[in-house]
Image (spheres, rainbow, N blue to C red):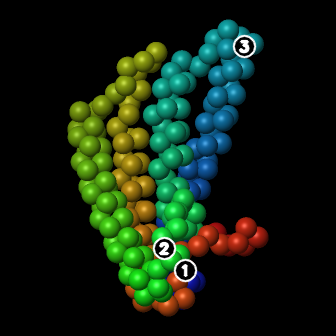
Amino acid sequence: MARDGGMIDGAIRWLSNVLAAIGGIALILMMVQTVADVVADQFFSRPIPGNLEVISVYHMVLVVFLPLAFIERRHEHIQVDLLYQLMPRLMQRVTLVLGYLLCSGFFGILTWRTWGDAVRALAKNEMLMGNVYVIIWPAKFVLPIGFGAIGLVVLLHAWRAATDRKFVPKPPPLDEASV
């Protein structure tokens, strides 16, 4: 399978890019909201009510969980490959496939469990009591979306590791403009 080819690859690339973009927008909004809160507090002695709760429940969750698939697709998660480098090529390939399949199972379980938690939170209209009441059930749906997306990416990596002899799980060069 070619690196740039395939409908499934294109769909996963699009999904991971969109989720990372939403995470980036959430990061910018978090910074703007924090600055607005500091300005409101320092100049008007009126901080934004519930600012900490909203940032903690919404912005941070979006920033952390949505870009997971993008980072994995680009092979930019931390890897420790000390023993891997000492293995023969066939053993490296088998290790990659098994590792990716194990990860996809792990992310599948996380997706399933966090989806159930999100549905239960929606059913009871779960809220957080702080300085203000914050409805938190929408944020709980971010986790299964992020876990599901990274699960799809590692499944695609498992397929590539099993079928493409040129597949190498290394980050692209820093000068590569393609996302």
Residue 98, position in %: x, y?
34, 75
- In the displayed orientation, state which residue is furthest to the top: 45
Of residues 155 and 27, the one nearer the viewer is 155
Q: Element under label 3?
A: helix
Can residue 19 be seen here? The reply is no
Relative to residue 163, is residue 80 drawn left or right?
Answer: right
CB within 8 Å, label 2 to label 3: no
Of residues 34 and 168, the one nearer the viewer is 168
Report crowding for label 3: few under 14, some 14 to 19, many 20 or more residues within 10 A (C-alpha): few
The residue indicated by pointer 3 is 42
Residue 166, position in %: x, y?
54, 88
3 or 1: mark nearer the eye: 1
Report crowding for label 2: few under 14, some 14 to 19, many 20 or more residues within 10 A (C-alpha): some
Amino acid tagged 1: Val
The residue indicated by pointer 1 is 168
The quadrant where residue 157 appears: bottom left
Amino acid tagged 3: Gln
Mark found first going from the N terminus, 3 or 1: 3
Relative to residue 50, is residue 143 drawn left or right?
Answer: left
Relative to residue 78, is residue 174 drawn left or right?
Answer: right
The residue indicated by pointer 2 is 84
Q: Which residue is depicted at the point 67% across and 9% down? A: 45
* Label 1 to label 2: alpha-carbon separation: 12 Å
